[in-house]
Image (cartoon, coloured by chain):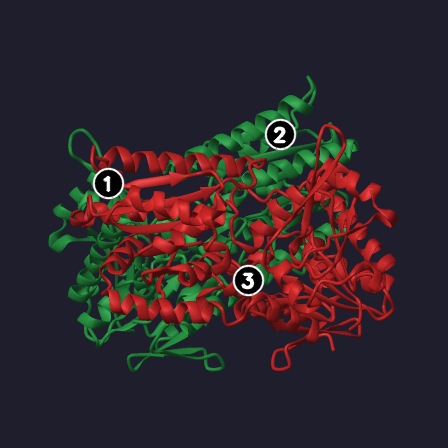
Chain colours: A red, B green
Amino acid sequence: MSQVLVASNRGPASFSLSEDGALTMRRGGGGLVSGLAGVTGAPREPSAGGPDVLWVCASLSEADRVAARRSPDGRIDLGGHETGGAAVRMLDIPEATFHRAYNAVANSTLWFVHHLLYDTPRSPHFDARARRDWQSYEAYNAAFADALARDAAPGAKAAIQDYHLSLAPRMLRERRPDLRIVHFSHTPWAPPEYYALLPDDIGTQILLGILGADHAGFLTERWASAFLDCCELLPGARVDRAARTVTCDGHVTHVGVHGLGIDAEALRRRAAEPDVVERARALREQVGDRQLIVRIDRTELSKNIVRGLAAYRELLVNHPEWRGRVVHLAFAYPSRYDLPEYREYTAAVQRTARQITEEFGTPDWDPLILQVNDDYPRSLAAYGLADVLLVNPIRDGMNLVAKEGPVLSERGCALVLSREAGAAAELSEDALMVNPYDVSQTAETLHKALLMPPAQRRERCARLAAAATALPPQRWFADQLAALD
Amino acid sequence: MSQVLVASNRGPASFSLSEDGALTMRRGGGGLVSGLAGVTGAPREPSAGGPDVLWVCASLSEADRVAARRSPDGRIDLGGHETGGAAVRMLDIPEATFHRAYNAVANSTLWFVHHLLYDTPRSPHFDARARRDWQSYEAYNAAFADALARDAAPGAKAAIQDYHLSLAPRMLRERRPDLRIVHFSHTPWAPPEYYALLPDDIGTQILLGILGADHAGFLTERWASAFLDCCELLPGARVDRAARTVTCDGHVTHVGVHGLGIDAEALRRRAAEPDVVERARALREQVGDRQLIVRIDRTELSKNIVRGLAAYRELLVNHPEWRGRVVHLAFAYPSRYDLPEYREYTAAVQRTARQITEEFGTPDWDPLILQVNDDYPRSLAAYGLADVLLVNPIRDGMNLVAKEGPVLSERGCALVLSREAGAAAELSEDALMVNPYDVSQTAETLHKALLMPPAQRRERCARLAAAATALPPQRWFADQLAALD
């Protein structure tokens, strides 16, 4: 198999530095790491000629930079089974450049566009400062393209990930026309009328950037189709909807859909570990024999936590029979706290939760448990115990919570799912679907979910789990690479 | 000609009540009133059998209600040339119902959806209260349908206006299948992914409501097309894009485009009156021999005044040669001040204006004149004097400022126009087009507009004026009625 290069903002490992200067490596998880293991197979010995996989990512801390400097040729061998013996190259991107590219452009602009998050009368506001931020985004993408171009063996495959790196495919093709390039979008894609919020030159460059790849992958048909809609408005591009190709400057890009599901075996193995079992015991004690509604999200503007809590409140108002008989466990982990919108949103979540507790709480009953500290084993424990899982994003590339929950559910949970999540494409038959802006409908759907007969719940949950595991990360990643052949 | 019924929230006249109980009628203007005059021709004598036109509207004040009660049969004869002898029926809608239908649903929901104005992570928030508001909107529409059904002669034509009355066409058809009904949307129409923010039942009812008409009119091809896109997702509806029809429940609705332009003669006549001449003199004195950039808007979230001011600021930063040589006259008239978002937006406009004055103003030069009091003759005077007219809405059904300006311009103004205004469809060749979210591009375009050679400016302005007057209101309204034959 030819060499495979992976490029993403966050890499498969991170480092910490102790006071005596020793480096500790912490390997990360996630679909991409699992996917890679499927491609590379068993771990390799460095002596066997070095890894076939090189992962290029950004240094996210001073320790990452030290690790990169200390490694021969700047390549760090990861070892271990999960990454199949890949090496990683951590790019040392100047802090100001990184901050503008990552926070100002990727997370505050492109993320907002694709998730329809803007408060349009006020933002976006593309002024001189936004233009400077954009130049940093170009420099950040160029740094990746340079590294990939330098490290790639002739004819290698490069898998470039997500909205942080939308310009890199074209930049890499310009530098190394011999490579085969795939770009994968983990986000939704904006409809053309919303994509048009971007300045013309920026919107055009992003499309041209991705069209530098031979294959552009999306999580669902819906996002792929929106991408093609935007390409149809791009001067000089020719879209063939039937063949699902875009031809631009004589180069053909295939557009493909690659759903991302759960590695059931790995997830179940992790959930069987003692830390999860211990947390499940504690949760069971806390909840007692009440029904349990669970939600698990980063505190992300797109996750719609405030409306979800409001729906729970409306449930308790309209159906007082549930008071004392249900508990809502809401995990809202910190996210992007360096962006003011996210700090405000976190405060709104906490305020809404407090109001519910004050309005309905009794000495014997906590209607709502809001947890804001990240605790992965506790999340896994909650999946196991949930009677109802609420996943109501206003827009979401896929949403893996909706897939993990049914896989780990012990009694068979009912899934209340937003139609705006990519996962809806695969799960809508057995989930109870909601419009995420419709708080009343969400409240009524929670009521229905709580009333669902246990046998029906178990059957639906089993089908949801089957759908959720139909496309494990190994297959997802292998499919993208195969599309390049 | 058969009887014509017109229905709109605001009617062609309003009343005031003096302390001694005497009523004074004030006739309004606007495209619809002009359009009506074109249809009815010369004023008619009541003795000649009564008017052929009945205009149904809401009572907007206590005086309106008194006027309706004092009139025989509740019909008020308007008299006068402008309305061609129409009578008006002012509906007495309970205040709470009106408030919810008008403010909560029409102006805070439907307006927001069609103009893409929502701050999506926070609003809309369709809870129990929104459902109660919706019931008021239904009641408000039913009141119109009842009145129209009662007053219509057999086979009469009914012209129902705008987003306040999207349910009325279907309600009227149910009550009076013998009538011929047209609905006209003066707003943009949302793309399907944004229209889907509405609760399913509400979104469906609005489409079905309009599809109760025989003909659904829009201001541009773009909004008509977006409406058809939404209808394609409506269960049970069949869209024929070529014929531009929607068939639903066995009933066929034709979808048509009817651009709305300026009645040049009437506008020029008004602009020649002494109050306009006097204001032009005062403005000329204030501005001196500097170039003048004019904008005229209601302080409406969609009008994008803050970004427009920011663009002017960026012009002064990037091209300091204009300091002291240009004045920006920004008219921002009060609008919807009972909605908190509008009060906040008004404050933001004033804050931004103050910052510009403080940053650049000198004892000899006011860079910016912000006027917040409605003064129609002053607006007309400003049109006459403008070197550059800035019209940069984030989304707009048509925008008549962009059409009035070139018609009244004395020296030939350059028009800087948002591509998101409906007027762009007719004016984009001779206007300088901008993306309304792109402040930097808007600043550069203002610079280009200021530098445009006078001869080119005059030529373009003449063509803009010709395009702006190609579809006068008389023709616009007659076309809609003709589409019913």
Q: Residue at x 51, y 61 (%)?
A: A398
Task: Tell me which residue sits at (45%, 54%) in the image.
Answer: A394
Badge 3: residue crowd in 10 Å (few <14, some 14–19, many ≥20) = many
Point out residue A77 in the picture as x, y percentages from the top left corner: 77, 53
Give the residue pinned by disc 3: A191
Secondary structure at badge 3 equals loop
Q: Chain of mark 2?
A: B
Q: Nearer the viewer, residue A30 or B305?
A: A30
Residue B368 is tagged as: 2
Q: Chain of mark 3?
A: A
Along the line of sight, which residue is nearer the eye, B382 or B319? B319
Q: Earlier in the sequence, mark 2 or mark 1?
A: 1
The image position of residue A178, as x and y in percent, is 86, 70
- CB-based contact (under 8 Å), mark 2 and mark 1: no
Disc number placed over residue B61 in the picture, else none: 1
Protein chain holding label 1 = B
Q: Nearer the viewer, residue A327 or B243?
A: A327
Q: Residue A416: where, in percent of width, then height? A: 35, 59
Q: Is residue A284 above or below residue A412?
A: above
Task: Please identify the quadrant where the C terminus of chain A is shown.
Answer: bottom right
Amino acid type at mark 2: Leu
Q: Up-down: is B253 above or below B115?
A: below
